[in-house]
Image (tube, rainbow, N blue to C red):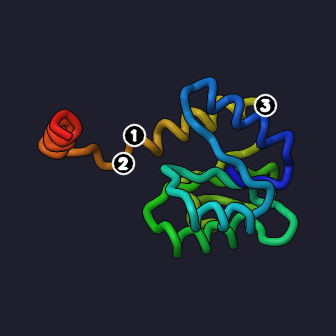
Amino acid sequence: MVDDNEHGLVARKTVLRQRGFDAVTATSAEAGLELLDTHHFDLVVTDFRMGGMDGIKFIAHLRQRCPGTPVILLSGFVEALGLDEQTTGADAVLSKSSNEAASLVRTVERLLTRRKPVRRETRVKAAAVRHIG
């Protein structure tokens, strides 16, 4: 999760961890890009307005480095600025609001489950390798 508001990061991280998700945070888009250089993430959540690079520019960089990674963009200005998936490059755009936590969890679950499931043969081979090795 990338947001220059540390309190928002802590709150979202807590909500996601309570639902069984591991969450790593960065307080700037630049720090988020550094994390992408050294870690693999199943999904990225980013704020729109941040000091330095904004969320849309961050998403553009993320798409170059990790093209298949789902992205959620959060903003308190979704309606006012006309932010949507087409204008931002995000897979989902959520408004910061009183029901943000529920929307975030629902969207994370939806985006992670829409990924292609592992084929059964692959799971069996992996289990056999772990068992033997």
| Label placed on residue 129 | none
| Label placed on residue 113 | 1
Q: Amino acid at mark 2?
A: Arg
Q: Which badge, 2 or 3, comes first in the chain's sequence?
A: 3
Q: Position of residue 90 (x, y in %)?
A: 58, 60
Judged from this view, the residue extending furthest toward the front is 133
Q: Position of residue 35 (x, y in %)?
A: 64, 61
- For the point 62% across and 30% down, the residue is 17
Q: CA distance from mark 2 to mark 3?
A: 28 Å
Q: Residues within 10 Å of mark 1 (few under 14, many from 20)?
A: few
Judged from this view, the residue extending furthest toward the top is 18
Q: Amino acid at mark 1?
A: Thr
Q: Nearer the viewer, mark 1 or mark 3?
A: 1
| Label placed on residue 98 | 3
**Which residue is the site of mark 2?**
115
Q: Secondary structure at mark 2?
A: loop
